[in-house]
Image: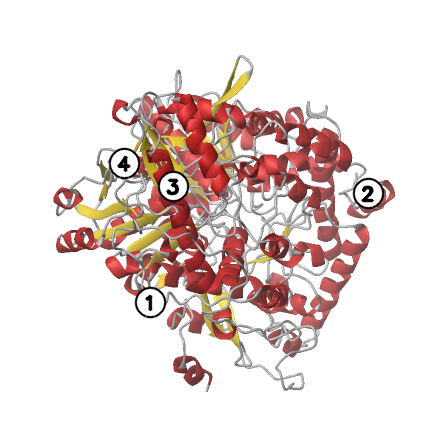
Amino acid sequence: MRYLPLQADDRRAMLAKVGVTSVDELFAAVPKAKLLRALPNLPKAKGELEVERELGRLAARNTPAASVPFFVGAGAYCHHVPASVDHLIQRSEFLTSYTPYQPEITQGTLQYLFEFQTQVARLTAMDVANASMYDGSTGAAEAVLMAHRITRRKKAVISGGLHPQYADVIATLSKYSGAAVHALAPDPQARETIATTIDAETSCVVVQYPDVFGNIRDLRPIADAAHAKGALLVVVVTEIVALGALRAPGDMGADIVVAEGQSIGNGLTFGGPYVGLFATREKYVRQMPGRLCGETVDAEGRRGFVLTLSTREQHIRREKATSNICTNSGLCALAFTIHMTLLGETGLKRLAAINHANACDLADRLAGVKGVSVLNDTFFNEFTLRVPGDAAAVIEQLAAKGIMGGVPVSRLLPGDKAVADLILVAATEINTDDDRAAYAAALKEVL
Amino acid sequence: MAMNSSGRPTTPGTATTGTAATFTGNRALDHEEALIFESGALSKTGVDLPEPKQHKSRLGGLERSGDIGLPGLTEPETLRHYVRLSRKNYAIDSGLYPLGSCTMKHNARLNEKMARLPGFGDIHPLQPQSTVQGALQLMEILAGYLLELTGMHSIAMSPKAGAHGELCGMLAIKAAHEAKGAQRSVVLVPESAHGTNPATAAFMGYTVKTIPARDDGTVSVDAVKSALGPDVAAIMLTNPNTCGLFEPEVVAIAAAVHAAGAYFYCDGANFNAIVGKVRPGDLGIDAMHINLHKTFSTPHGGGGPGSGPVVLSKALSPFAPLPYVVKDKAAYRLIETATAATGTHPFGRLTAFHGQMGMYVRALTYMLSHGSDGMRQASEDAVLNANYIRVGLRDIFSQPFGDQACMHEVLFDDAWLKDTGVTTLDFAKAMIDEGYHPMTMYFPLVVHGAMLIEPTESESKQSLDLFIATLRTLAMAAKDGDVERFKQAPQFAPRRRLDETKAAREPRLTWKASTEHKEAAE
């Protein structure tokens, strides 16, 4: 077995040193009847080549994004990741290290977390950010819980523009922790009047920016309405590249910003692992969930970094912790930080501009197909398309023609007749002119 | 047994400077590295992107104006920066990483290669299901393997890490009680438990009732019985426990818990000790999370991402969360919404999409590579290695619960350091100077000055012999009164001890331009 250094003679010598005749004597605490005699009913060990072949067969049954014109988004986006990002995150010292509990020998991890926190704070225009969450959706649920702690209220108002799966995560955690959720109806054209739903019981308002249907809204009126009632504004961003083009939530009154950071540095990977970004105002930092890296000095006065404010965390506070989170998404945060460093301000703004331009071009092309309309007045790189008939069937027909045309809204909101003819369509820098032309042509054919 | 609430010191003592200063501050291969905010520039970039096409903006007048404050670097500068940072990290690939309860085993590179196959790494969670049949099949195969190894009835794949899995298991338990109309408000947690256990229970509104450990480090069925009552919803027990011991009365505990109408949640963080040896399902467990990043070798990545699928008993299976995979006729299908779920009562959704696919591929690669024989051998080797360390140190170190066989990790306390002037923390820092990552310190909390050592199966006998010899030498130095060696440690790491108190009292959580940094340095 190529992964096990102990050889038969090592085992014999070690058992003798330990003073037992067989390894099963070390399992003496296990009730005899429960100790397995036979091996588990699974295949025996395989060499690398055989394993590669077996997994290769499974992989070949999937259609990779890069192999077709690809316009699927709805919370996960296909972007180009520079080759050096994946090379660097596979450095042994990053890949096979753990949570930096011993700061003297994990300054590499700690310094990139500090860089990550700073990048996230600046991108969102907030004061502080943590060292990452599992993903955007779990971050959103944690933001709601944090708002409950800060305001000592227990009701969240959820916009109908929030990604339905994010809303489900919030609803699940709220239900079982005794908190209330007031979820507004799905709102494809950003017409809801969320301000009027905020009352004295409301701890926070959760809005997505751009929303799941692609609409972009000025958040300031919502922030003002929330703050007037003593509630917080939680802003969710599922396409973080948008903040390279759009005014930051922190400049529009957000109290907590959570985001899915996958778009920067991280591949699609069928939905995970991703990286949650979580930022807030300085005054709320002690109510924040997750790990935080802070700057300090060592015994010689040199700058160094440590995990800090851990009195919020479960390993110290146990049942009084702000969250039960232990592991975060360190390596995905590293990928984010490296990609963001490669982009820099200049590259990020350019990338965002290309995404917006490609989406505008695609929207115009698709709106030119007979019977099809684009619902949005505003959007960044994703918009909602209305097609005649069942959107899910259209997407399947497009897939049969080798075009991944987007996400039928019915996949997220099954049974809602009002959205059954809607498709979420995303365009990024990976889409060429030919891709967009092919989409319009194929759509014309299937309708 | 009393909890050790004193904790470990968080400020460094005074250090003596042992090494000569250099002009750069560098020490040969160890470079002082500026932050990107100091070395980068807003105008710099490491990507070449084309001009965007001209078009009318549809951003609704909300264009971002002004600087964001994100400096960039060119590609060579980026490579050098992060390579230099990487060299300030300890890693499994560079040495023994005996963090108890964390299972820092070898991370095979084949796992990485497989996760990056475009058919796994470049597929979207919401693309048509007809185009991801291989991915759904992989999830089903992995689920089947995990069920075979645990002897459980069903599995929830989506939890993102161990603590998320705990939440999943406890939500299923709460849903099961609610389905029966039962109002139960208490969760029993042994005092040796991971902090995530009481944090999870409390988050869900349960009152946490602590069960004391016995003098031998295990939980007695009598203590559990006396704490059980009609208000108890569940017990959260780690097995093998955090003291490195298999709970000998686990079967009787499960029976007592079930007799009281409660459920048994098992923290599976230590599953690496028993894969192929014992099945949690045979012990009466109702829910257990499996840390794929521990037992099944998906890389820890500096603190994540993890993956924490939860196996469930028959009683809890109907309440498993969304989404889940079903197979009908020749196709696999995801059940993603309550509307689509038939015959089950999912408690809800824990995350967007379907879980940590990248980790599933790695874990399955590990399982296929090891096979049933290799996985059992791995557990046996992990247990043998831990016992070999125990026997190698037992005459010098002290064991809080006497000298007894341990599972895959061995626990010592600091009684043997009494009157030496050296603490567990000092000892750990001296290990750094010897080229080792320290063991888990000050956990579990039931033991004073705990040192929890988990070598894993990835270490050779030679590696363990050197480790044991090193620890023995350090121990003798401590007993011989060479206190300075410990107080000054680490002396050869990229940093000396860091001032954690200062970090917490004057939090600097982001870089700010400036004078204030220079002032602080003066």
Q: Position of residue A278 (x, y in %)?
A: 38, 54
Q: Chain for mark 3?
A: B
- Depth check, front residue: B50 or A126: B50
Q: Quadrant of the N terminus of chain A?
A: top right
Viewer-nearest of discs 4 and 2 = 4
Q: Chain for mark 2?
A: A
Q: CA distance from mark 1 to mark 4?
A: 30 Å
Q: Residues within 10 Å of mark 4 (few under 14, many from 20)?
A: some
Residue name at image x 46 percent, y 48 percent: A263
Does the residue at mark 2 contact the one at mark 3 (Cβ under 8 Å)? no
Q: Which residue is mark 1?
A: B66
Q: Residues within 10 Å of mark 3 (few under 14, many from 20)?
A: many
Q: Which residue is mark 2?
A: A11
Viewer-nearest of discs 1 and 2 = 1
Q: CA distance from mark 1 to mark 2?
A: 66 Å
B5 over B484 or under it: above or below: above
Please tell me whether mark 4 sits on a helix, a strand or a loop: loop
